[in-house]
Image (cartoon, rainbow, N blue to C red):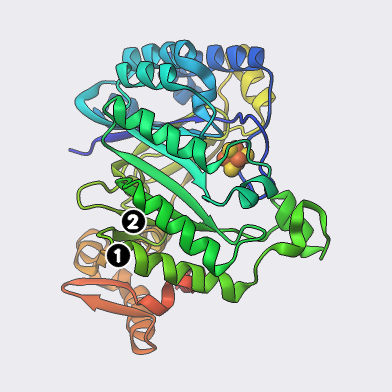
Amino acid sequence: MDHLGVYVQVPFCASKCSFCNFSSRVARRDVYDGYCRVLCEEIECLPELYQSAGVDSGLYRLPADTLYFGGGTPSLLGAARLGRVLDSLRRRIAFISEIEFTLEMTPGSAGAEFLRQARGSGVTRLSIGAQSFADPELRSVGRLHSSDDTRQLIADARALGFRNISLDLVAGLPHQTAASWQATLLSAIALRPEHVSVYLFEIDEKSRLGGEVLRHGTRYHAQFVPDDDFMAEAYETARERLQKEGYLQYEISNFALPGFESEHNLKYWQLKPYIGLGAGAHSFDGQCRWENESAVEVYQSSLACNASPICAVRQLSVSEQVEEFFFLGLRQRAGIKLATARRRWGRQLLGPWTQKVESLERDGWLERINQNVRLADRALLVSNEIFQQFIAA
Ligand code: SF4
């Protein structure tokens, strides 16, 4: 039987980083209260809300083995609000006894007392947005913390018994150089986190910095953003260094010491069921995807009138299910098993996709490892282009 993943979206941050393309915003503390109140209502009324949105899903009845508070900066909520949301969750969803419970944190967003309470509430894993260990880079993108704050947070977490810590790093920040990126990697590794995520700064209109780079402007230190060649090299350097230090790359952006892969995030790539709660959160039951209103006010006002905050429901066609199997599954370094797809959809239906696999294999973009098909190393940096080929293959 499948276990459920539960994701809770907290769309607030203490400041807005210039490179961020997530939907999060700075808000007063009283806004957190209103948001958490409504979030609890969503959790408690989930069966009725699903019914009124036409989502025919008993997903919330599955036992859950992962819980993930992401955002935004969920640690800003403080222990009392977090506790109220958890109470609602535990009333609605049957969690197994040993869950992976991740809380995203930004260094400096909460102190040791909050960490102690979070641990007492059952948090088992901290995902910390370190981004860089070079203070000028952190300052240039508007982070409120320093590299010492990151070190202090990890020291506090270790002292309190946290044994599963993940660090996020970003390659391609303004002023970053090959030397400062090496130093960031070494500083991260010296702290021996169990998990490291390496992201490449995405230059697009969704972030202030990305938009400024596209316009060739100079705000947000945009003229100091390194070029594409630097990004490619930074990614390779990270892969080499982390793997040398015992971190296994298990997904395009994710590395873990053995046994510390993110169970929750694996569900996304393995098409396992999950429920998303909060503004903009997404859910999936294996065949149907749905999402909540992303604007906090709209999300809150829907629930205030006892209406569903779900704004889009999409039943996946068989072709879409196969496409997702390929482009999500291939994100994993373990790759995918074609035999699994054949068992599920039949050899004949799968024909166009298996031909695509064979042609990408001939061209050196995919490779076979044991019985699995996976991206070749040279395809990692152009993965989106490869995935595109599995859509309507
Ligand atoms: S703290 Fe994280 S979510 Fe918030 S603005 Fe910065 S990068 Fe985005």
Residue in the picture at 40% in, 13% down:
88
Using residue 47 as the reference point, say whether residue 209 is left or right of it.
right
Q: Can you give x and y, in whole percent of width and height, for residue 124 in the image?
A: 29, 30
Quadrant in the rendering for residue 358: bottom left
Location of mark 1 (residue): 243
Q: Considering depth in this image, is 50 or 84 the residue closer to the camera?
A: 84
Mark 1 or mark 2: which is in front?
A: 1
Tag 1's secondary structure? helix
Q: Quadrant of ligand 1?
A: top right
Q: Considering depth in this image, is 238 or 95 the residue closer to the camera?
A: 238
Per the model, the C-alpha gap separating discs 1 and 2 is 8 Å
Circles 1 and 2 in contact, beta carbons < 8 Å: yes
Location of mark 2 (residue): 255
Q: Can you give x and y, in whole percent of width and height, for residue 78 in the image?
A: 50, 17
Quadrant in the rendering for residue 276: top left
Q: Considering depth in this image, is 221 or 286 the residue closer to the camera?
A: 221
Does the beta carbon of the residue at mark 1 sit less than 8 Å from ligand 1?
no
Residue type at tag 1:
Gln
Does 242 sit above or below residue 4? below
Using residue 227 as the reference point, say whether residue 81 is left or right of it.
left
Using residue 38 as the reference point, say whether residue 116 is left or right of it.
left
Q: Earlier in the sequence, mark 1 or mark 2?
A: 1
Q: Can you give x and y, in whole percent of width and height, for residue 60 in the image?
A: 33, 26
